[in-house]
Image (spheres, helix red, strand yellow):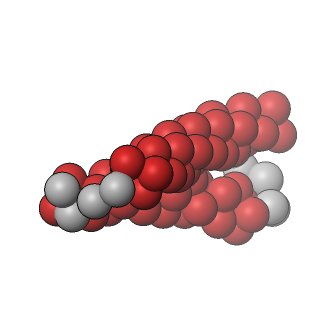
Amino acid sequence: MPSIFKALASISVWVLFIVGCSWIIDTFIGWALAGFGTEDWQMSAAGEAIGITAIILSVVAINLRKNLE
């Protein structure tokens, strides 16, 4: 695997991981400020799902990178 693809894979893994973590933290802060029993809980649950999905995708991408070496 050429080094440029390794670098791009590493960058995409870090971006996905940071975006996922920041999305989860942002959703928790929004939930804490608005209250956990609000009517808009579906949007918060969707935010959590997006964050978790981004973290899972980063794990999948790093495994693909390791398998291609």
Residue 68: horizontal and vertical position, in percent? 21, 63
**Taking 38 as reference, is 27 left or right?**
left
Residue 15: which quarter of the image?
top right
Say if residue 9 shows up in the picture: no
Residue 10: which quarter of the image?
top left
Q: Furthest residue to the front?
A: 2
The answer to whether 22 is drawn above or below residue 37 in the figure is above
The one of 31 and 51 positioned closer to us in this rendering: 51
Residue 28: horizontal and vertical position, in percent? 65, 38
The one of 6 and 40 positioned closer to us in this rendering: 6
Say if residue 25 shows up in the picture: yes
The one of 38 and 64 positioned closer to us in this rendering: 64
The answer to whether 21 is drawn above or below residue 54 in the figure is above
The one of 16 and 35 positioned closer to us in this rendering: 16
Residue at left offset 78%, top offset 53%: 38
**Taking 37 as reference, is 16 left or right?**
left
Residue 3: horizontal and vertical position, in percent? 37, 48
Quadrant of the rendering where the C terminus is positioned: bottom left
Residue 51: horizontal and vertical position, in percent? 56, 53
Residue at left offset 42%, top offset 57%: 5
Quadrant of the rendering where the N terminus is positioned: bottom left
Residue at left offset 48%, top offset 62%: 53
Number of marks drawn:
0
